[in-house]
Image (tube, rainbow, N blue to C red):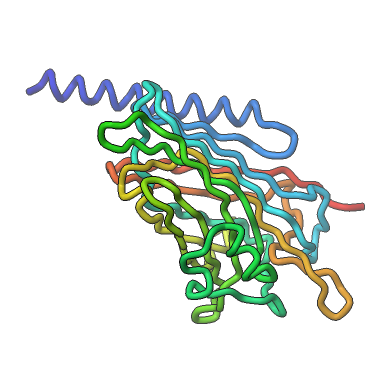
Amino acid sequence: MRKTVLRTLAVMRRTLLRVVAVACLAGLLACASAYALKIEIDKTVVSATASISPRALPSDGNVPVEVGSVTRIKTTDGSQPPTLKQLVFIFDKNGTVDTKGLPVCTAARLAGTTPAAARKRCAGAIVGEGVGRAEVRLPGQAPVEMTTPLTFFNAPPEGGRPTLIAHAYETIPTPKTLLVPFSIERIHHGRYGFRVTIQLPEIAEGYGAATLAKASVGKTWKRGGKTVGYTNAHCSGGRLQVHGTLSFTDGSFFPGTLTSPCHTLG
C-alpha cells in the first residue's frame, strides 16, 4: 500500500512539473501578436493561442476589435483524446460587447441547416466564424477526421445578457446540425469582467472527440453614421487577457491564462 501511494505521488509530481515547465516555456516563446500556452497532463496535450487585432488601441474609450483563438487537443500516444464537455472563459474587463442595432437569429431558424444555409438565412446576425475538427472512431472502423465550419450568431438577449448560438455541422455517422447556445455574463473578478460557459454537445453519437477549435469574433457595422463593433476594447497595462478552463468527461481539466499584447495609440 505504501509503495502504491509513493508511486502515485511521484507520478503527480512529475505531471505537475511538466505542466509548469511547459507553461513557462510557452510564455518565453510567445509570438509578437499573442502568447501561446501548452499544457500536458498524463497523455493529453492541450495548446492554445489568443490574439486581439488591432494591437494599437486607445488607453481610454473602446474601439472595435477582432478576437481570435486557436485550441488544439491531442494525445502523446496517438490514441483518441478524451471527450471535451465544457469550456469556461473569463475575459478582460477592459472591453465591451455591443449588440444595439445588430440583427438576431434564433435556434428555431437555424435548426436542421447546413453551414451555408445557416449563414444565408441569418447573414446579418453573424458575429464570428471559424473551423472545428474532431476525431471519430466508429466501432470496427479506422479513425476518421471530421471538419466543420463554425459560425457564431447574435441571439436574443436573456435577462439583459448578450447571447450567441454556435453553429456546427457533423457528417458522421449521419448529417446533423449542432447548435450550442451560450450567454455572456458580466462579472467583477480582478482583471476580468466577462464570463462565458459553453456546454458542448455529443459528437458523432459519442464516438467523436474534439481536436481543433479555431474562431474569430468581431463584427462591425454602421450605427448613426459611425462604425461600431460587436467586440470592443482599450489597452491597459500593455495587454488584454483571457483565462480558460477545459473540462473533459474523464474528469481531467486544463486551466490556462492567455495574454495578447497591446499598445496605446499616440
Percent from the top left, x then y, of residue 233? 73, 60
Q: Nearer the viewer, residue 159 or 200?
A: 200
Q: Residue furthest left?
A: 1
Q: Say left or right for 153 vs 264.
A: left
Q: Nearer the viewer, residue 236 or 252?
A: 252
Q: Does residue 21 sit above or below 203 in this rendering? A: above
Q: Position of residue 83 (x, y in %)?
A: 35, 43
Q: Residue at x 84, y 69 (%)?
A: 227
* Quadrant holding the N terminus: top left
Q: Which quadrant would residue 64 be assigned to in this image?
A: bottom right
Q: Decide: is 89 above or below 227.
A: above
Image location (x, y in percent) of residue 92 = 62, 56
| Image side of residue 28 versus residue 181, left or right | right
Residue occupying the far right of the picture? 266
Residue shown at 45% from the left, 50% from the top: 170
Residue depicted at x 50% and y 81%: 159
Instruction: Please tell me which residue is depicted at 51% across the width and 31% down the height of the picture.
Output: 38
The total number of labels drawn is: 0
- Please name whichever residue, 151 or 171, is drawn nearer the observer in this view of the structure: 171
Residue 156, horizontal then vertical, whole percent: 56, 78
The reply, left or right, for residue 180 in relation to residue 118 is left
